[in-house]
Amino acid sequence: MRCKYSCQHRYNIHPQKSTLIKTERTKTNHQHHTISLGESPKQQEQQTTHLGIIRAAKYETKLNIQEHISVARRTLYTLIAVGLNGQEGLNPRTAYKIYQAYVIPRLLYGLEILPLNSTQMTELKQFHLKTLRCFQSLPIRTATAAVYMLLGALPIEAEMHKRQLSLLYSILASENTKLENLIERQMTVNAGNSDSFFSRIQEILKYYNLPTVSEFKDQLPSKMQKKKDINRTIANKWSTILQEEMKEKSTLKRCNTQMLKIHETHPVWKTLPPLTYEVKKANIKARPLTGTYLLQEHFQRFTGNT
């Protein structure tokens, strides 16, 4: 049938470059039939890659997460030569800009369409957090909120939300009739289905107090205005969340939380000259700010001596 359809619409399906994957999610007792592409029978495969996304019969999302983290890690390794290696390298502010431009796009490519669970998001979060901590040469015990706010960096969840909202805008701005029909169908049939993109996007819009999909479609802003509004809304939301989290941490009592915001770097990194020894000095300054510099009082507390 597929071969006949392609012939009618004047395009060819290459038999060697085509892969057959069984996507049936429920167990059935039906007899398996041989599927042919033209005169060539096709064997079922466990997985393949299409447009950079792994398509698999089982554990599709898990495989994509592992592959994307692996690609992002290899990208980081290739950037070590330009100084992306923590204490001996660049200003953390510059390192983060390079990370934003080269690593995050490869880490999150295509993941906005996949239904990620909490475990998979945790894997992405750990990689993201570990990288930002390495740029600033901060120890593992550093509060998570401080790692983000000193650089003005967004958590990986927020980076994912930006891409999902951008995809939503692209779909709504499209004049394709089939896409419009698909939106209406998905909004009606899969309203409570967590595997549906539109169900997840409704939760994201609600989380950031943004208009619903229907309201968004009726008053669609320009692309630049949309980008500006979404970035500002996400930054304000996470600035508030992380500031509140920092206030609850006793180790961050020396850090002025009111001056820390998303997209705004702390002066300890912002005023740093591009010199290696200055980076090392700034790393020491960042330790008292984050409550990770061991003082005499800490030694006394640990040893029990007065």
Image: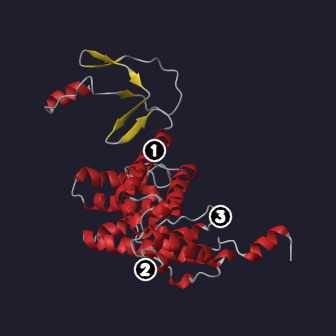
Place of residue 246 in the rendered image (x, y in percent of width and height, measured from the top left) = 61, 75
Q: Which residue position holds label 1?
A: 70
At mark 3, the secondary structure is loop
* Residue 233 percent location from the top left of the image: 42, 74
Q: Nearer the viewer, residue 24 or 264?
A: 264
Give the alpha-carbon distance from disc 1 to disc 2, as whole Å: 33 Å
Q: Residues within 10 Å of mark 1 (few under 14, many from 20)?
A: some
Residue at 36%, 70% (x, y): give it.
Answer: 215
Q: Which mark is residue 141?
A: 3
Residue 198 on image: x %, y %: 41, 56
The three-letter code of the residue at mark 1 reads Ser
The quarter of the picture where the C terminus appears is bottom right
Q: Are marks 2 and 3 in contact (CB under 8 Å)?
A: no
Mark 2 nearby-residue class (10 Å; few <14, some 14–19, many ≥20): few
Residue type pointed to by label 3? Arg
Label 1: which secondary element: helix
3D distance between C-alphas at marks 1 and 3: 25 Å
Q: Is residue 302 left or right of residue 195?
A: right
Where in the figure is residue 101, as x and y percent of width and height?
Answer: 34, 60
**Mark with earlier residue (1, 3):** 1
Marks 1 and 2, the one that precedes in the sequence: 1
Q: Amino acid at mark 2?
A: Thr
Residue at image position (75%, 73%) is 298
Which residue matches tag 2? 271
- Residue situated in front as seen by the camera: 74 or 114: 74
Dot 3 surroundings within 10 Å: few (below 14), some, or many (20 or more)?
A: few
